[in-house]
Image: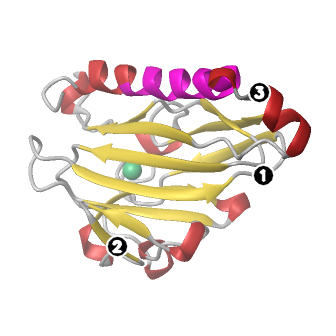
């Protein structure tokens, strides 16, 4: 899978969809749950991959894949972000801190963390409207990705913009190109009840 991030991501996304479908069908338990108890919260796991520009044939244009996506509204969503980018793009101090997640932390390569040293940040996954900020450290190498997992509670239905706040794009300040183009280091998250 690590050598084939696109196929791996698609397969994992399919797993997430299938587990939702399995919960919806209830495996025969719908009757009891429907009469006596509220439905259990749906566990939803969403997978993101961060690719370097070189990996997509567009040097200098790293991208989150997918950049525009839909999550269940008003739900606890776990996100796993696998980043192959081994280049740093130091951030201001506030973007080195993990905020807005359940428990205020994230798991980075198997270790619980509440922050990443600013000089070790490659990208951030930030939804400013939700005060959600998760810094993603540099990968050990382009072949050894960093894996960051966190959970957050999604808002009621709507659309928010996410943005990477590590200046990983082009231009003199690193804020041009990928940083300013939907589909690379910014995109739209739709929170849906359907
Ligand atoms: Cu970035």
Q: Which residues are magenta?
A: 12-26
Image quarter (top left, top right, bottom left or bottom right) of the C terminus: top right
Residue 11 lies left or right of residue 97; in this view the side is left
Residue 133 lies left or right of residue 140; in this view the side is right
Disc 1/disc 2 C-alpha distance (Å) = 25 Å
Q: Can the viewer see residue 176? A: no
Q: Which mark is residue 112?
A: 2
Please give the name of the residue rendered at 51% of the width and 40% of the height, measured from the top-left corner.
45
Q: Which image quadrant for residue 173?
A: bottom left
Residue nearest the observer in this picture, 109 or 58: 109
Q: Which image quadrant for residue 40?
A: top right
Which element is circle 3 on?
helix
Please give the name of the residue rendered at 51% of the width and 33% of the height, measured from the top-left corner.
67
Which element is circle 2 on?
strand
**Residue position marked by numbered label 3 in the rendering:** 30
| The CB of the residue at mark 2 lies under 8 Å from ligand 1 | no
């Amino acid at each position: 899978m690590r050598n084939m991030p696109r196929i791996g991501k698609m397969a994992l996304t399919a797993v997430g969809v299938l587990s939702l479908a399995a919960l919806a069908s209830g495996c025969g338990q719908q009757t009891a749950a429907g009469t006596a108890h509220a439905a259990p919260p749906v566990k939803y796991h969403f997978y993101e991959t961060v690719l370097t520009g070189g990996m997509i044939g567009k040097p200098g244009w790293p991208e989150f894949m997918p950049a525009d996506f839909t999550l269940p509204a008003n739900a606890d969503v776990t996100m796993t972000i696998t980043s192959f980018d081994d280049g740093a793009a130091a951030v201001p101090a506030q973007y080195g801190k993990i905020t807005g997640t359940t428990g205020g932390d994230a798991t980075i390569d198997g270790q619980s963390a509440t922050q990443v040293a600013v000089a070790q940040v490659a990208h951030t996954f930030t939804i400013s409207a939700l005060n959600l900020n998760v810094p993603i450290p540099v990968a050990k190498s382009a072949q050894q990705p960093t894996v960051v997992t966190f959970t957050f509670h999604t808002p009621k239905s709507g659309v928010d913009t996410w943005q990477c706040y590590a200046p990983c794009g082009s231009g003199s300040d690193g804020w041009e190109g990928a940083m300013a183009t939907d589909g690379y280091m910014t995109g739209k998250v739709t929170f849906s009840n359907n």
